[in-house]
Image: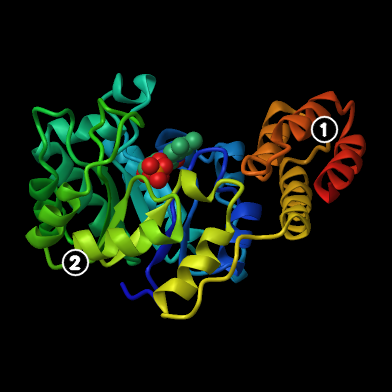
Amino acid sequence: MHLKGRLVLASMEEHTTLPFRLIAKELGANLVITEMGQPDRIAKGDKMALRMLASNPSERPVAGQVLGGELSDTVEAARVIEGRGFEIVDINLSCPIRRVIGRGWGGAYLKDPRRTAELLSRVVAAVRVPVTLKFRSGWDAGSINAPEIARLAEEAGIAGLILHGRSVVQAYAGPADWSILRTTREAVRIPLFGAGDIRTPQDVLRMLEETGCDGVSIARGCLGNPWIFSRARSALSGNPMPPPPTREERLRVLLRHLDGETRFLGKRDVSTRIVRLALYYAKDLPDFKEIKGVAHSARNYDELVRSLRVAFRG
Ligand SMILES: Cc1cc2nc3c(=O)[nH]c(=O)nc-3n(C[C@H](O)[C@H](O)[C@H](O)COP(=O)(O)O)c2cc1C
């Protein structure tokens, strides 16, 4: 697996849809990943699950992610993802959601290295494209096993790793532990991308320096802030970092994102999801509260767009 750069748009449910992936790509992400697909639904050809695997040549290379579930469904889902033209199949063994781990899926796999090894080797054997693994430092603070999982993944033929420096039990709370990224980097030869707490371009440089990771995966830090990719890219190539986006630029990308997202969802309304998406782009502005008020009082999509135009122009 060879990437042209070191910046990955992390997989995020409800966020890394095709419209947002295209924006991140244009602004400098070197690899984008779909949100996680449900293995059982993809395997049985569920229409909604397949819709989430919509892709577009201009976002390539793109990885299609499947949540690690029952063995046969996960293997079949990987074949479906490959069949839809994705360059990479990414397996998610990091999801901490209760109903997921309750079924022994996602992050629950990390409790059982043998079961993990079997799943990974079966998926690798089933497809021709590279298979990557998204995982966490371990199940909980008392069972940190990322280096062991990384080694068995490498033996199973996994082409690259994305490691989130939090345990499954920790979910998203508290700081990520970057020292486990370094230890795991040293345990294997395949590429390892670090994840957790990247909020600024400076964090990208710091993670690379402190952990020796081959690249970084950017998650919450790019919500409403896809410019983190273009700015980090400049910083990585030693060029002066572009300033943060102007209000005009934020508005331009926000409107494009809203347009893409509502087309993708097939309806133009002011759902909670759409309002939340718009507000991410305003979160760093001094008049965030006013913009929030305006967005929440919009009665329909056109009104939302009109009022955002006025509010962002300040
Ligand atoms: C809203 C949300 C949804 C997420 N969905 C997924 C997912 O579908 N697949 C996945 O592998 N990770 C998912 N993650 C985890 C992120 O990819 C990332 O590993 C994690 O947020 C740590 O990075 P951060 O501290 O920079 O946010 C999600 C995270 C968030 C906040």
The N terminus lies in quadrant = bottom left
- Amino acid type indicated by mark 2: Ile
Question: Does any atom of ligand 1 lie closer than 8 Å to the CB of label 1?
Answer: no
Q: Secondary structure at mark 1?
A: loop
Residue 43 in view, yes or no:
no
Residue pictured at 18% horizontal, 30% vertical: 139
Q: Residue 295, relative to residue 3: is it above or below?
A: above
Q: Residue 102, relative to residue 229: is it above or below?
A: above
Residue pictured at 34% horizontal, 34% vertical: 95
Residue pictured at 37% horizontal, 60% vertical: 204
- Amino acid type indicated by mark 1: Asp
The label on residue 190 is 2
Q: Nearer the viewer, residue 139 or 158?
A: 139
Residue pictured at 58% horizontal, 60% vertical: 227
Estimate the x, y position of residue 27 in percent, counting from the top left: 59, 67
What's the distance in space between the residues labelled 2 and 1, CA to CA?
A: 45 Å
Q: Residue 61, relative to residue 287: is it above or below?
A: below
In the displayed structure image, the side of residue 146 where residue 304 appears, left or right: right
Q: Which residue is mark 1?
A: 269
In the displayed structure image, the side of residue 77 where residue 175 appears, left or right: left
Estimate the x, y position of residue 106 in percent, counting from the top left: 30, 34
Residue 54 in view, yes or no:
yes
- Residue 105's quadrant in the figure? top left
Q: Secondary structure at mark 2?
A: loop
Dot 2 or dot 1, earlier in sequence:
2
In the displayed structure image, the side of residue 11 where residue 242 appears, left or right: right
CA neighbours of label 1 inside 10 A, class few (<14), some (14 to 19), many (20+): some
